[in-house]
Image: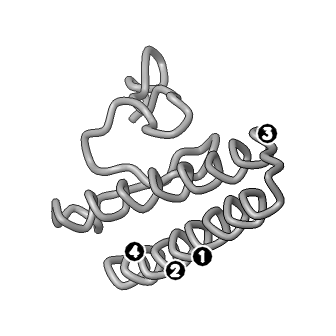
Amino acid sequence: MSSDLERRRDRLAQQLVDLQWDLGGIAYEMAIRDHFRLDVLNSQAAKLQQVDAELAEVERILKLGQAAAAGACPDCGALYAEGAVFCWQCGRDLMPRGAEAAAK
């Protein structure tokens, strides 16, 4: 699983670089035309922020050395470390409750 996470980290790092490049290019093109569209900049920045957050979580899991015990959120697919109570991305409760907990 660690090598899967490392590949995912590398892919996300490249996506982050590409999105930063694109955001800079968009801002530059708007500047030279003296016509800024905040909706376009905000949309691109939101994509960048999402990838940055996912990359940070993957790096955190790798640093903790708990990659083998990590799972994926059943709702959004975001990775989580052992002992996580809520999904860092969508907020889903990851702890089994009630009858579910008793069955396990």
Q: Write down the quadrant of residue 10 in the picture.
A: bottom left
Residue 74 point in image, percent of width and height: 59, 44
SS of the residue under disc 4: helix
Q: Nearer the viewer, mark 3 or mark 1?
A: 3
Query: In the rendered image, which residue does mark 2 sit on?
Result: 14
Q: Viewer-nearest of labels 1 and 4? A: 1
| Mark 4: amino acid | Leu
Under mark 2, the amino acid is Gln
What is the C-alpha distance between the residues marked 1 and 4?
Answer: 20 Å
Look at mark 1 in the image and give the residue it sits on. Answer: 18
Alpha carbon distance from label 2 to label 1? 6 Å
Q: Picture quarter containing residue 56?
A: bottom left
Q: Are marks 1 and 4 in contact (CB under 8 Å)?
A: no
Residue under label 3, please give it. 39
Q: Which SS class for mark 1?
A: helix
Tell me where residue 53 appears, x and y as whole percent.
45, 50
